[in-house]
Amino acid sequence: MAQFGEQLTTDIRAVIADRAVRSVFQPIVELDSGRVVAYEALARGPEGPFEAPDALFAAARDAGCLTELDQACRAAALRGAVSQGLLAPATVFVNVEPEVLDDAPVAALFDPELPVPGDLRVVLEITERALAARPAELLRTVERVREFGWAIALDDVGAESLSLAFMPLLRPDVVKLDLRLVQERPGPAIAEIMNAVNAYAESTGAFVLAEGIENGTHLTMARALGATLGQGWLFGRPGPGAASGARPGTLRLPAVQPAAPRGELVSPFACLPARVPVREAPKALLIELSKQLERQALRLGETCVVTSTFQEARHVTPATRLRYRDLVERVGFVAALGEGLPVEPMPGLRGADLAPGDPVRGEWDVVVLSPHFSAALLARDLGDDGPDLARRFAFALTYERDTVVRAARALLSRVAPSTGQRASTEDGDVSAVPAGVVSLLTGRSAGDPGEALLHRALAAVGTGVTIVDLRLPDQPLVYVNPAFERLAGQPAAELLGRNCRFLQDTDTDPAAVGRIRAAIAAGAECREVLLNRRADGSSWWNECTLTPVTDETGAVVQYIGIQADVTDQVETERALLTERDRVRRYAARIAELDPRVTVPVSLPSPADGPHASTDSPGARRA
């Protein structure tokens, strides 16, 4: 079997090396006139197991040569278009495999050795995944594509909600509706897509192209959705060249102005038109304005893009992290920029480190963009030296869509490619425990052989293990093992960076919580049983033992928590107490009826160990 896999790898690489990939062309029709105005190039392999595109690309993924295949398909499309005479006035649509842009530089789209005739009109099809993966790089490439004389199509619109939010950022000349929009029964999701796409087309002059039109019913739906171009078996299947007997036409694409001069990185504040009034305000007011825009973004949901600047990483406070955790969970795309911010400040949040000389370094910007809403708070620091909340900024709050789009592009042009790496504690992941934690626990430096052993041991422990860092704001979790993830009902990515109080419920005993806080303040060990609640709403009793960890000076810098689910034990104990009380009531009642009768009331005592506080609200309600 392994030998067969190696043979397939060899074969797919040979297909690419031998330029055995070819293209077929499917007509794209102007719906009103029926004229064929363009063709989409579709990849095919040589006759055999790789002829179908699904098999061709699957083999390339398995062999790790998807980028090379994608380049070969694009080259084959351009060669085929020239050899088949698909030149002006015809237009050729050429695809980019979305997965390629997750891993490879966008520069790989261009082959400098491949001559492109001036009368070959090309539309490059990309998806919203490409912008989400490599924002800065793709935005620059889109401008390069336009300088090259090619146009842009946004493919598969409607397949993902994020494509609606990214339309104004990519400024596509053609919006290609996902085939399910014309083939499925209309519903609220399709209505939302239709509203967004039609609004964009009306404001820009972009064409709307419906895919998957196979019969008259599909054609009727495509027209109703606002499509002026169509593609599908109703108009013709893919063939080696121009469709036989077709009436040719011309696709007159809208003129698109460059977003900015080549190589220039403007700042959002610089995007403000002269007519927009600029006012002054202290930082305290900007905080509230920012929160209001964030709340608006939460209501917009998955069709929304949020980009923000924080000047420096230290301004991303624990409270800010909690707000942005909510944004990441509910908004389509969220990015934050600031000096010292990493590529991914928290799971799902895209980041960018601003150089000290970058003009954005002196700004406070919050940009919210969706199909039907746009707003931007754009502010510049005036350099005050007073109290932080009193620092003054020159600012403008604008809802003008063109300005908001320019500001969003200005920020996204600085966002680096996603690493695609998130912290995980599964299988003893060595990156899960910070090096400082390792040195404190083991006395060894990071990379010592004992470090890996520690990780494997913590991952294998059946009870929850957590580490809290007292040196960080709000004393967040910096490590959780897989057992604690199961107890809390959430993955590590959603637990790290949060204070443990999120586990508490309204029925958690405040006295027990107070004892824990007092012990931490005193740097002492403590042990309590608390009622906790998981993310799904279920509750459990947590026997929590907290042990302080000191540094070389003797100062307490971290706490190790050992968590055990003692729900069964607590419930058994409470059931026994309830039963004992019931028997005592019966005995007292019998004694009232006949004093001569003596009833023993002894019952097994709960096992020695921790007890849930009988003063807790949960115990009183039981």
Image: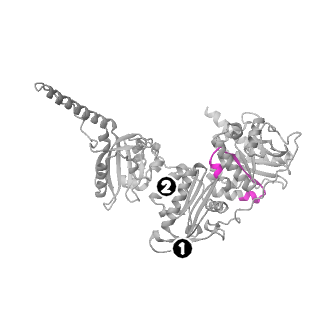
Within-10-Å neighbours for mark 1: few <14, some 14–19, many 20+: some
Task: Give the percent coordinates (x, y) of residue 363.
Answer: 56, 67
- C-alpha distance separating marks 1 and 2: 26 Å
- Judged left or right of residue 320, residue 11 is right
Q: Which mark is residue 382?
A: 1
Closer-to-camera residue (272/573): 272
- Judged left or right of residue 332, residue 616 is left
Closer-to-camera residue (149/171): 171
Instruction: Compare marks 1 and 2 and give the one earlier in the sequence.
Output: 2
Residue 367 lies, with reference to residue 493, above or below; the image says: below
Query: In this orientation, does residue 312 appear?
Result: no
Task: Give the percent coordinates (x, y) of residue 231.
Answer: 77, 41
Write the start and end of the magenta stretch as one range: 143-165
Q: What amino acid is labelled 1 in the image?
A: Leu
Q: Residue at x 48, y 48 (%)?
A: 493
Closer-to-camera residue (567/208): 208
Q: Residue furthest left?
A: 596
- Judged left or right of residue 151, residue 522 is left
Q: Which mark is residue 323?
A: 2
Q: Quadrant of the C terminus?
A: top left
Task: Give the percent coordinates (x, y) of residue 22.
Answer: 78, 42
